[in-house]
């Protein structure tokens, strides 16, 4: 697919965008990165994702693929020749999809409550967030990666959140490493990969962004 | 897979359970149906879905697959020899997954507000519900089914909601057919299939169930 045109509409602190960046890096696929301003969305974004109007959107030869997990599956199906991200066994694939879905349904919203709220809601978010991480730690078990020996689909779905941990810890006043040491060991293992290291922003830069968001939300 | 043991933990009015019933019927797969009492969940359900504790759960040779859309993909991947539900082209597959995800994120919650609330929230639910149906009608276009000429993945994800339309119309005081005639024509087309007709409960029985739920929720 040498002549393919591939564009990623993204926003640097997005853990959903990071999934596509990592998947594309794992497959060694070149693409054009276009940064969006979420407070002044481009006509291209509104045209390519008229339903949700959200990043990330992968545009392959003019056709949009929306929703990050669906985008990772698309990348997997189109570029099959290298770095398989999903296991081949149907049951293992279903398990990988289950955990990616769990991350979207549970972890995202609990993390958001920590930096995007105060008081009781923030406390509830912190409790849920740590519970989620413990559940995920249980799913990881003693394996190096969620799928076993190889970095793959669930790792890609999850690792972007790690760049937000410093913000969660700062506003929630807790230590992820003290609560979930195996989870943090897994995250550090992922960060050693080039595909991950170059796709995740610096956690201090994310904290600065979280501060800006909290000001916009009237929380500070 | 003649000696496979396949069990479906389900609850008759669940539009999510209906997805698995229809997919299994399309593939002509035999299974044991076990009705759950959601107010007194079985030890088997709690053991098989400890994370969400929700139906439907498909249990294949003792191993659980949770989350209905993931279950439909699992059925597709294990029983590949008949009635392919997803298109083969990666872009078309991504589109099918996008619409299934849209149904879960938008349609379910708007429908729920109509029968599960009163007053302003109910009115908001009705507005969102009709908007969702119009978006889906746009995605259907002039095709007989969402994937084109063949009944498939998005149809399976969506048609179960049709058994709840009578409840939504009763509590929301509107006519889906007047608002979205092409959508209703599609639903009636689906209902002509044996796999769908035998998997969906009678809409009047669903209304009786919705009444019971409203009493439990203190809405009547």
Image: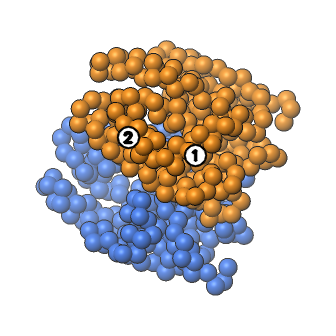
Chain colours: A orange, B blue
Can residue B133 be seen by looking at this rendering?
Answer: no
SS type, badge 1? helix
Q: Chain of mark 1?
A: A
Looking at the picture, do discs 1 and 2 lie on one chain? yes
Q: Which mark is residue B207?
A: none
In this view, the residue farthest toward the right is: A2
Is A9 situated above or below B20? above
User: In terms of depth relative to the viewer, which is nearer, B37 or B126?
Assistant: B37
Q: Locate residue A109 relative to residue B69 in the image: left or right.
A: left
In which quadrant of the rendered view does residue B17 lie?
Answer: bottom left
Q: Locate residue B148 relative to residue B46 in the image: left or right.
A: right
Which of disc 2 and disc 1 is earlier in sequence? 2
Q: Tell me residue B169's x, y (percent).
A: 30, 51
SS type, badge 2? helix
Image quarter (top left, top right, bottom left or bottom right) of the C terminus of chain B: bottom left
Q: Nearer the viewer, mark 1 or mark 2?
A: 1
Q: Tell me residue A89's x, y (percent).
A: 68, 63
Q: Locate residue B157 relative to residue A112 in the image: left or right.
A: right
Q: Residues within 10 Å of mark 2 (few under 14, many from 20)?
A: many
Can residue A174 be seen by looking at this rendering?
Answer: yes
In this view, the residue farthest toward the bottom is: B3
Q: Residue at x 58, y 25 (%)?
A: A201
* Residue at the disc numbered 1: A186
User: In terms of depth relative to the viewer, which is nearer, B89 or A8?
Assistant: A8
Q: Residues within 10 Å of mark 1 (few under 14, many from 20)?
A: some
* Residue at the disc numbered 2: A110
């Amino acid at each position: 697919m040498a002549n393919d045109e591939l564009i990623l509409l993204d926003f640097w602190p997005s853990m959903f965008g990071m999934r596509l960046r990592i998947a594309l890096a794992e497959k060694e696929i070149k693409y054009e990165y276009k940064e969006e301003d979420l407070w002044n969305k481009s006509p291209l974004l509104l045209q390519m994702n008229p339903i949700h109007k959200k990043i990330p959107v992968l545009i392959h030869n003019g056709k949009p693929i929306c929703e990050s997990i669906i985008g990772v599956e698309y990348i997997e199906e189109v570029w099959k020749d290298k770095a398989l991200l999903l296991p081949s066994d149907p049951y293992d694939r279903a398990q990988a999809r289950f955990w990616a879905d769990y991350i979207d349904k549970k972890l995202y919203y609990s993390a958001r409550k920590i930096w995007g709220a105060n008081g009781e809601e923030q406390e509830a978010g912190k409790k849920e967030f740590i519970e989620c991480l413990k559940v995920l730690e249980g799913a990881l078990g003693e394996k190096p990666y969620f799928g076993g020996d190889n970095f793959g689909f669930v790792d890609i779905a999850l690792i972007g959140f790690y760049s937000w941990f410093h913000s969660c810890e700062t506003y929630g006043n807790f230590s992820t490493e003290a609560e979930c040491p195996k989870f943090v060991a897994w995250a550090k293992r992922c960060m050693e990969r080039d595909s991950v290291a170059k796709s995740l922003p610096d956690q201090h830069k994310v904290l600065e962004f979280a501060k800006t968001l909290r000001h916009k939300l009237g929380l500070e």
